[in-house]
Image (cartoon, rainbow, N blue to C red):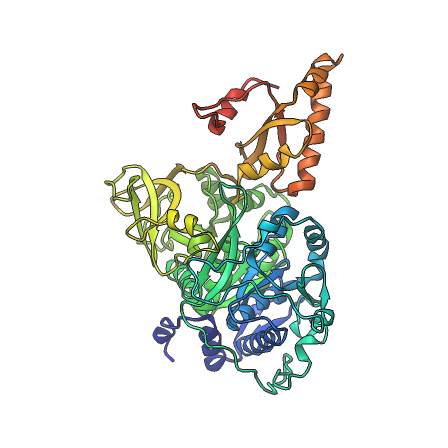
Amino acid sequence: MTEQGRDRVSTLRGLVDDWARDYPNDTWLISPDSGVKLTFSDVRRFCRHISSSISACGISFGSSVAIASPNSISSTIAFLATVYGGYRATPLNLVAGSKSINYVLGHSGARLLLLAEAAVPTIEAALSMETKPSAVETKPSAVETKPSAVETKPSASEAPALQSWKDGLKIVMMRSADNPDEWDWGGLASRDNDNLPATDFDGGEAGYATQATIDADTIGLLLYTSGTTGNPKGVLLTNVNLIAAGSNVALAHRLTREDIGLCVLPTYHINGLCASVMGTLVSGGGLVMASRFSTQAFWQQVSDFRCTWSSLVPTLFSYLLNDEATASPETNSLRFLRSASAPLAPETHRLFEKRFSIPIIETMGLTETGSQILSNPYPLPNDERKIGSAGIAYGNEIMIGDRSGRAVGVDVEGEILVRGANVMSGYLNNPKATKEAFTSAGWLRTGDLGRMDSDGYVFVTGRLKELIIKGGENIAPREVDEALLLHSDVLEAAAFACPCSQYGQRVEACVILRDRVASEVSCEDDPSKSSKELEAELVEHCLTALGKFKSPDRIHIVEKMPKGPSGKVQRLQLLSMLEGRD
């Protein structure tokens, strides 16, 4: 097949099969920690073996398969193999907190969990929580045409074959970060099934269990994103959405088979998963999958593997810029670095390029669009980029619209709307939110405000929603509110975003105490000390309920909060209200 023909492939299975057929010995996936490398042929063998094993576990076509793992070869193959077999890959955000993980496992209807040993404590904590009956929705999604993701509970004869922690959830331990042959299927996936292939890095296939037919509209990814209601929403991305997402990245950055990407962002977020994994898979280049980001290791990995690009978030650019330990890193192989997930401060942008002489391409994306919707052009001499802009549209359409979804004029502020093959099919089991997310003409409402200049460059000016964007990740204020309200001393709570040089924004909150507690605090000989002690107690309470990432850095005890006519707290006024306080 020609490279042009490959552009028309509409399923991940077809893409993997094509690369394995045409370039079987080309390396695609590399672990910088162990040096293990997988060719396209290896990737296809593992995809066939694991998808067949999932089927042998009794998981029906179209169902959710949860994945709990930090970045690794195994986590990447787990995603690919799940989609390859016609299932919904459901990566779990390991820093989202126990409540969120518990909710996602229930709401997604997952009955199989591919679990890395490093993630066991996190999952144990999530599964030990009490689950409300409403957490698992069994009604079909309004936007799906595939079978329901919620299966019946396994029979008594099946359940003991794998470790089961809760309600028939089957656990497959990914014992090796580098070799999926070493996963522990507990005997179930190979029992009475002679069609499963025996695979290894060097050997061939002994057979392949035929999978159900998949097409462009088959859901491949179910990824949860924070919303203003507190509970995360399950974004449904089809096979064609995933292919389009990778294609848009490859198009904007002119990726080819000669490029090698370095993935340092977690692949349970859309940026790492679609920009890095799908971008390199569509373009046929190589992918170095780092287990995590490290300022010390980053430049060494770039040098060791001759990486030509990497996708970062603004926080990481700040880390690298402020790292004095590496004076003159080896960067000759790098064509560019990509910035995404949050606006990059123009001053950071300029200082970084001046120090390292590496072009930064600023982009913008959402979970609902498979990551990228805007990008500045690749910086060749005749191309123009505008620092401070998220760029222009590549592979999809962008419009700035008014409240009715009608286009506004040049340089007029409005909501950023997007339409294209990369845009989600909807939210799982949430037809109301799905309907509200689109205009009558089919444009996805991003919730971001911006303006477009006469050259088509978009400048983001703010957000319609009240989400807190910390390090490029969305945090719903209401989720923090609800955690604080669980504390017996808290009467009212409101979380809000506070500017932060490290993360862009950090989480802070105001609370009003119940009368008895407020009286006790004010009567102390040293009331400031008492207040600080109580604030520390509330922060610790949030750490337990939400995890470190979402917990407030500071909790302010106040007597009143600004409210509108309806009694709703006006979050955007909280920061100015606190100015001048200690």
- x 73%, y 19%: residue: 529
Q: Viewed as shown, does residue 43 lie left or right of 350?
A: right
Dividing the image into 4 quarters, which one contains the N terminus?
A: bottom left
Q: Is residue 580 above or below residue 349?
A: above
Q: Position of residue 398 (x, y in %)?
A: 31, 50
Count of marks placed on residues: 0
Q: Viewed as shown, does residue 221 lie left or right of 422?
A: right
- x 39%, y 63%: residue: 244
Dividing the image into 4 quarters, which one contains the C terminus?
A: top right
Q: Position of residue 2 (x, y in %)?
A: 36, 78
Q: Can the viewer see residue 364 in this picture? A: no
Viewer-side residue, 123 vs 22: 123
Quadrant in the rendering for residue 513: top right
- The residue most toward the right is 525
Q: Can the viewer see residue 191 in this picture? A: yes
Q: Position of residue 265 (x, y in %)?
A: 56, 54
- x 57%, y 39%: residue: 479
Q: Is residue 501 above or below residue 393?
A: above
Q: Is residue 136 above or below residue 530?
A: below
Q: Position of residue 40 (x, y in %)?
A: 53, 76
